[in-house]
Image: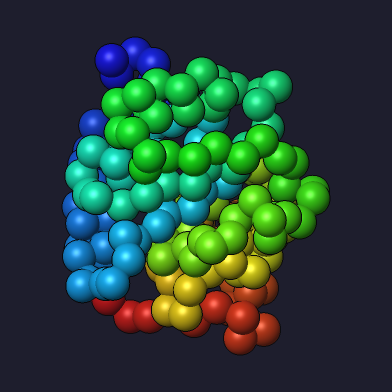
Amino acid sequence: SAEAAEGRLTRSQFLHLGRLAVQEMSVASQKPATACQAGGDHGVTGLALLCFTSVHVLSRGIGSRGDLPRVHEWLQAAYPGRHRYIEADNKVALDPADSTPLACDMVLVNGGRDEDSISRDINNFMQVASTGALLVVADCNHAGEGRAGSAFASFAHDGEIVEEEA
């Protein structure tokens, strides 16, 4: 039930994320596309991706905060074999053993609300992102304002990520 995955997304945000996922993940591929997310303790982002697409989802978060372990169980039951949960703090680099043979085609950073946490999440998932992966950062202002915008702008300035014009 949707109660298991309550979160902070509005209905229009949920639908927008789903449409974005369908658009980005519809590229023909030899393997199922994989979306990787940091945070998402309520499971709404994972649910939107699983519901709208055939994508596989890897969620990484701190199990002691939020409902992610319980939500993972629900998502696994509803979408067998398509959702994987790794309990880990973003202060620790993503263990390659946890993520192989994973290549993230879409990376969603929806975790910490401070610049350092957001930067670590982006950096950790860059290590397993496929070439040309889509990066979505929650609460991001592309002008570089705010915590998320500042982290995003720093990676863009250093050439580590490329912002494409719509």
Residue 146, x across and y down, in percent: 61, 55
Compare residues 23 and 165 and report the one nearer the observer: 23
Which of the 4 image quadrants contains residue 111?
A: top right
Q: Residue at x 68, y 56 (%)?
A: 97
Looking at the image, residue 129 sits to the left or right of residue 132; the answer is right
Taking the image as shown, residue 50 lies to the left or right of residue 147, namely left
Give residue 28's position: percent from left, percent from top. 21, 72
Question: Which residue is at the front of the view, 93 or 66?
Answer: 93
**Which quadrant of the figure has residue 145?**
bottom right
Residue 8 visible to the viewer: no
Q: Is residue 123 left or right of residue 37?
A: right
Image quadrant holding the C terminus, namely bottom left
Q: Position of residue 110 (x, y in %)?
A: 53, 45
- Is the residue 29 above or below the residue 5 in the image? below
Residue beneath the point at 22% across and 49% down: 53
Q: Residue at x 70, y 22 (%)?
A: 64
- Res. 124 in view: yes
Q: Quadrant of the N terminus?
A: top left
* In the depicted structure, whether residue 21 falls above or below residue 160: above
Q: Please state which of residues 76 and 69 is positioned toward the viewer in this rendering.
A: 76
Q: How many marks?
A: 0
